Image (cartoon, rainbow, N blue to C red):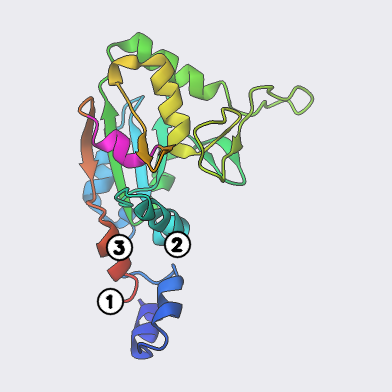
Amino acid sequence: HGQLAEVTQEFSLKNLPRVLRDTENTSQKLACFKPEAEEAFKGLRPGDILAVQSESQFGMAARLQKLVGASGDYTHTGMVTQEGQVIEIIGGAGVRLSDPNQWLYNEHVAVLRPQFAGPESLKKTLAHLVSYLPSQDWTKPNPKSLSYDERLSLKSDDEQYCTEFLYKAAKDNAPELELKPSSTLGFKYVTVDDFKNNPHVDTVFSTGSNFWTNQVSRFV
């Protein structure tokens, strides 16, 4: 809040572009300081999708999503594994496992629960994702390793972005979810909206991320 106070003290229309570009400015608390978020994370199940938004990490992604017609409310995703970790793909790191509690260090989080037809489709979906994890033996690299797709294209299978990673795993192994990509001017893409607005995916918790509120919080 000290930085926020300094920015607002110097606020003027002249320096507005600089303030808007600085993603460190926000008056919103991290989800780890919200008891309801911590409580929701205690009830996570395998197959749950975690969606987050943080202006400092994913602010540009939110604005790009807004440009193509998505809500931009949540941008990054991962899925809870059978062991209770979260599998995700992220730029610079590729496919990795992380502690779900680390996801609380974002301003907003949501827990989405796909309605898998049964344990078999859930098992296959998770096995698909886990199969892309890097090998623990550097002498035997995983031939299925993925790179992060900076172009955000659904056409490539050897390069994928976070929501595409989950979408393709579920599309191939849990067709009952009937997941479909969005399209703008012929360009197909997948965002958190395509999971969140799907009738076969339940939102079991959300801190209520809103693109416009998130933008205003950066300098108010």
> Type of residue at label 2?
Ser
Q: Quadrant of residue 44?
A: top left
Can residue 68 be seen here? yes
Foreground residue among 42 and 48: 48
The amino acid type of the residue labelled 1 equals Val
Which residue position holds label 2? 56
Task: Identify the mark nearer the N-term, 3 or 2.
Answer: 2
- Can you say whether 40 is above or below 171 in the image? below
Q: CA distance from mark 1 to mark 3?
A: 10 Å
Q: Position of residue 59 (x, y in %)?
A: 42, 59
Q: Residue at x 38, y 90 (%)?
A: 10
Q: Looking at the rendering, which quadrant does residue 188 occupy?
A: top left
Q: Place residue 184 in its image quadrant.
A: top left
In this figure, which residue is indicated by the disc labeled 1?
Answer: 220
Q: Is residue 41 visible?
A: no
Q: 29 or 94: nearer the eye?
A: 94
**Disc marking residue 214:** 3
Q: CA distance from mark 2 to mark 1?
A: 16 Å
